[in-house]
């Protein structure tokens, strides 16, 4: 019985990971919806979204509160912005770029907005 439960949990983990890695259309979503944005604000919060491997970051940009949805957090290396960012961090991104800077206590973290290329 215990072995069956362990196998089921392992299969579920593999399915969730494969849905994160092999899903379609995410790069198109990022290039159409995220790349054109200019971000210049303070992180208010972050949270996991309902679908596996995706989260959101809520940002105060002075004149508006914006939420970046569908941030792929099953990412690698310099794409781990969702794992790194914390409330009160400053976050910057130029329009037309996927390069993101996060400033915390005078230290600048440099990231690329996650895609699945």
Image (tube, helix red, strand yellow):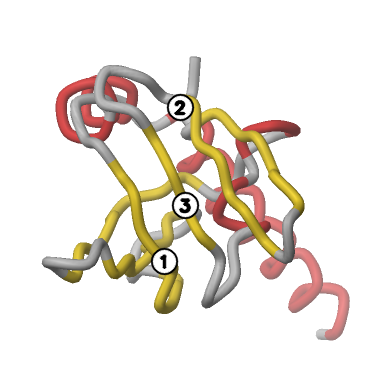
- The answer to whether 99 is drawn above or below residue 14 in the figure is above
Q: Are marks 3 and 2 in contact (CB under 8 Å)?
A: no
Left-right relation of 83 to 43 = right
**Separation of marks 2 and 1 at Cα, in angstroms:** 23 Å
Q: Residue drawn 64% across and 44% down?
A: 80
Residue assigned mark 3: 91
91, 114: nearer the viewer: 91
Q: Secondary structure at mark 3?
A: strand
Residue 61 quadrant: bottom left
Residue 19 at x, y = what percent?
46, 42
For label 1, count other residues whose C-alpha is less than 10 Å away and answer few (under 14), some (14-19) or many (20+). many
Q: Residue drawn 53% across and 33% down?
A: 21
Q: Are marks 2 and 1 in contact (CB under 8 Å)?
A: no
Instruction: Give the residue at the far right of this rendering.
Output: 3
24, 59: nearer the viewer: 59
Q: Judge depth for marks 3 and 2 and give the one in front.
A: 3
User: N-terminal of the two: label 3 or label 1?
Assistant: 1
For label 3, count other residues whose C-alpha is less than 10 Å away and answer few (under 14), some (14-19) or many (20+). many
Residue assigned mark 2: 115
Residue assigned mark 1: 42
Residue 9 at x, y = what percent?
70, 69
User: N-terminal of the two: label 3 or label 2?
Assistant: 3
For label 2, count other residues whose C-alpha is less than 10 Å away and answer few (under 14), some (14-19) or many (20+). some
If the image is split into quadrants, where does the N terminus sit? bottom right
Residue 76 at x, y = what percent?
70, 34
- The answer to whether 23 is drawn above or below residue 49 in the figure is above
Residue 63 at x, y = what percent?
12, 66
Instruction: Give the residue at the far front of this rendering.
Output: 106
Q: Judge depth for marks 2 and 1 and give the one in front.
A: 1
Residue 50 quadrant: bottom left
Q: Secondary structure at mark 1?
A: strand
């Amino acid at each position: 019985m215990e072995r069956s439960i362990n196998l089921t949990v392992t299969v579920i983990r593999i399915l969730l990971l494969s849905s994160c890695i092999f899903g379609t259309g995410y790069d198109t979503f990022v290039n159409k919806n995220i790349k054109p944005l200019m971000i210049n604000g303070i992180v208010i919060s972050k949270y996991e979204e309902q679908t596996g491997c995706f989260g959101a970051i809520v940002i105060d940009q002075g004149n508006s509160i914006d939420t970046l949805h569908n941030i792929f957090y099953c990412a690698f290396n310099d794409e781990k912005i969702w794992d790194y960012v914390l409330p009160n961090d400053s976050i910057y991104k130029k329009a037309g770029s996927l390069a993101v800077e996060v400033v915390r206590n005078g230290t600048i973290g440099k990231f690329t907005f996650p895609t699945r290329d």
